[in-house]
C-alpha cells in the first residue's frame, strides 16, 4: 500500500464524470492505497520540514454529491508520504510557483508528480516555444507596436493572457478588426505579464486535439470541437468532445517532445494540437482522461497508477 497525497482544488466540488484528479484518486483508492487530499494554501515549510493540513479519504464512489467521505483535517508531514500529486488548477502565478518551490524540499525521498522544479520552469504557453518549428507563428510581449506589426504580417490572430487558463481571456481578432488597439490597452491595464499573440489557425474549427502523454509516450487522445460561434474548444465553455485517431503528425510531435518531458520528470502531460501545430504543453493539471476512456480509449488513470506503483516498487 502506498500513501498518496493529492494537492488539488476542493474535491467536494468536482464533477465526478469529468474531473481527472478525482478519477486518479478513485483508481488509487480502489487499489487499497491510502489517499490524502489537501489544498496548496495549507502547505507549510517549518524549519525545512514540509507539512500540509490534509484530510484522509475514508470512502469514494462515482456518485455526484456522495463521491467522497473525508476524515477531519490533520497536519501531516509530507516527508512520510510516498507520492505527492500536484493537481490544482492554474492560474500559474506566484502562489503556484511558491507551492512548487516548497514541494522541491521533498526530493529525493518523496516522488512528486509532476516534478515541481520542472513545473515551475515550464509555464505551458512559454514551454511550447522551445519547439518553435512545431508551433504556429507566436509572439510573447507587452510591446504594443510589436503586436501591431505581428498582426499586420499574419492577419487573423489569437491573443490571450500568457498565464491564463481554461480559455479565459482568449480573443480571436480578424486582420481588419478595429477593436485591436482597444484590446491591447485593456490587456496592458489588466495584466502585468506579457500577452501571447499567435497566428489564427482555421483548422481549430475542426477541433483542438488533446493528447495525453505518460512518461513521454502518447497514451490517448480526444478531439474538442468548439461550439457554434466560438473560437475556444474548452469543454466548460461549450466545447464538444469526440473520438479521434492520432495522425502521423501527432505522433511526430509526441516523438519530438516526449524524451524532453520524460527527462524533466514531467510524467503526466497534456498537449494541444490544432491541425499540424502544437499549441500548448500542459504540465500543471492536464485533463481529459475520462473523455478519452468514454470514447473507447485507454484507461489512463489506471495506466498512471500502474506507472506510480512500478516506480515505488523498483
Image (spheres, rainbow, N blue to C red):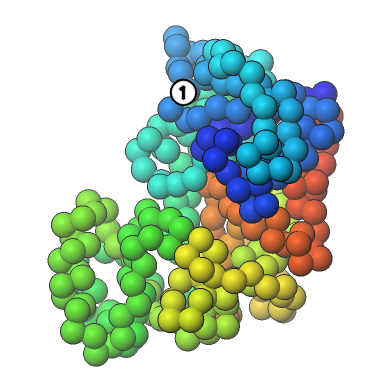
Which quadrant of the structure image shows residue 71? top right
Q: Secondary structure at mark 1?
A: helix
Binning the other alpha carbons within 10 Å of mark 1 as few (below 14), some (14 to 19) or many (20 upward) gives few
Q: Quadrant of the C terminus?
A: top right
Residue beneath the point at 18% across and 60% down: 188
Residue beneath the point at 80% across and 48% down: 303
Report x, y in % for residue 215: 71, 50
Report x, y in % for residue 200: 41, 81
Which quadrant of the structure image shows residue 155? bottom left
**Which residue is outermost to the front?**
65
Image: 44 above or below 127: above
Q: Quadrant of the N terminus?
A: top right
Residue beneath the point at 54% across and 13% down: 75
Which quadrant of the structure image shows residue 186? bottom left
Residue 9 appears anywhere in the view: yes
Residue beneath the point at 84% across and 33% down: 31
Image: 134 above or below 31: below
Report x, y in % for residue 227: 51, 76
Residue 177 as seen in the image, left or right of residue 276: left
Report x, y in % for residue 258: 66, 58
Residue 116 appears anywhere in the view: no
| Residue wearing tag 1 | 42
Image: 189 above or below 197: above
Residue 211 as seen in the image, left or right of residue 122: right
Nearer to me, 191 or 278: 191
Nearer to me, 85 or 138: 85
Amino acid at each position: 500500500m502506498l500513501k498518496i497525497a493529492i494537492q488539488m482544488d476542493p474535491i467536494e466540488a468536482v464533477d465526478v464524470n469529468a474531473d481527472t484528479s478525482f478519477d486518479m484518486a478513485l483508481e488509487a483508492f480502489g487499489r487499497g492505497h491510502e489517499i490524502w487530499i489537501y489544498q496548496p494554501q495549507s502547505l507549510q515549510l517549518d524549519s525545512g520540514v514540509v507539512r500540509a493540513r490534509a484530510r484522509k479519504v475514508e470512502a469514494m464512489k462515482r456518485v455526484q454529491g456522495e463521491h467522497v467521505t473525508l476524515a477531519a483535517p490533520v497536519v501531516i508531514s509530507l516527508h512520510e508520504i510516498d507520492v505527492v500529486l500536484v493537481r490544482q488548477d492554474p492560474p500559474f502565478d506566484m502562489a503556484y510557483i511558491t507551492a512548487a518551490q516548497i514541494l522541491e524540499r521533498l526530493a529525493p525521498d518523496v516522488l512528486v508528480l509532476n516534478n515541481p522544479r520542472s513545473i515551475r520552469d515550464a509555464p505551458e504557453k512559454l514551454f511550447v516555444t522551445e519547439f518553435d518549428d512545431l508551433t504556429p507563428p507566436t509572439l510573447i510581449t507587452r510591446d504594443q507596436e510589436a503586436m501591431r506589426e505581428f498582426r499586420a504580417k499574419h492577419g487573423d490572430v489569437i491573443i490571450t493572457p500568457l498565464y491564463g487558463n481554461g480559455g479565459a481571456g482568449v480573443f480571436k481578432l480578424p486582420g481588419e478588426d478595429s477593436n485591436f488597439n482597444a484590446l491591447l490597452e485593456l490587456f496592458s491595464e489588466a495584466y502585468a505579464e506579457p500577452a501571447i499573440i499567435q497566428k489564427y489557425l482555421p483548422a481549430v474549427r475542426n477541433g483542438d486535439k488533446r493528447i495525453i502523454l505518460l512518461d513521454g509516450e502518447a497514451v490517448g487522445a480526444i478531439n474538442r470541437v468548439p461550439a457554434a460561434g466560438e473560437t475556444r474548444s474548452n469543454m466548460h465553455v461549450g466545447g464538444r468532445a469526440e473520438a479521434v485517431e492520432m495522425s502521423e503528425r501527432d505522433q511526430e510531435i509526441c516523438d519530438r517532445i516526449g524524451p524532453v518531458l520524460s527527462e524533466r520528470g514531467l510524467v503526466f502531460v497534456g498537449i494541444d494540437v490544432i491541425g499540424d501545430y502544437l499549441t500548448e504543453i500542459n504540465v500543471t493539471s492536464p485533463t481529459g482522461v475520462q473523455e478519452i476512456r468514454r470514447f473507447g480509449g485507454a484507461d489512463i488513470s489506471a495506466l498512471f497508477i500502474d506507472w506510480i506503483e512500478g516506480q515505488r516498487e523498483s
